[in-house]
């Protein structure tokens, strides 16, 4: 799993989009994890999908 600072993530978004297709990317701020980037495929295989399908119109279409 790759870890990157929020500042570096802002400058390397294109690279991170490629990386997250292969592995999760943890984003840190002030040396603390504050977020994680995962692919839609990984999201579909997690509890995240259940959460968004209920709350976000069209999410089920994104997963198709």
Image (tube, rainbow, N blue to C red):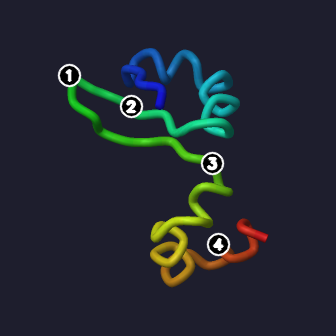
Q: Is residue 47 left or right of residue 59?
A: left
| Farthest bottom residue in view | 54
Mark positioned earlier in the residue sequence (3 or 4) = 3
Q: In the picture, residue 26 is in which quadrant? A: top left
Q: Which residue is depicted at the point 65% across and 55% down? A: 40
* Pointer 3 residue: 39
Q: Secondary structure at mark 1?
A: loop
In contact (CB < 8 Å): disc 2 and disc 4: no
Discs 3/1, front = 3
Query: Residue 60 at what x, y percent from top left?
Result: 68, 76
Residue 23 versus residue 50: which sits nearer the camera? Answer: 23
Element under disc 3: loop
Q: Earlier in the sequence, mark 3 or mark 2?
A: 2
Residue 61 placement, left or right of 23: right
Residue to which mark 1 is pinned: 30
Q: Provide the residue designation for mark 2.
A: 27
Of label 4 and label 1, which has the lower sequence position?
1
- Quadrant in which the C terminus is drawn: bottom right
Q: Residues within 10 Å of mark 4 (few under 14, many from 20)?
A: some
Q: Is residue 24 above or below residue 63?
A: above
In space, the residues marked 2 and 1 are separated at their CA atoms by 10 Å
User: Of residues 10 and 19, which is closer to you in this image?
Assistant: 19
Q: Disc 4 on helix, strand or loop?
A: helix
């Amino acid at each position: 799993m790759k870890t990157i600072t929020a500042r570096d993530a802002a400058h390397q978004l294109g690279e991170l989009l490629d990386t997250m297709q292969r592995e999760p990317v943890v984003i840190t701020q002030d040396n603390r994890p504050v977020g994680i980037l995962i692919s839609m495929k990984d999201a579909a295989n997690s509890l995240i999908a259940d959460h968004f399908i209920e709350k976000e119109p069209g999410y089920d279409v994104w997963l198709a």
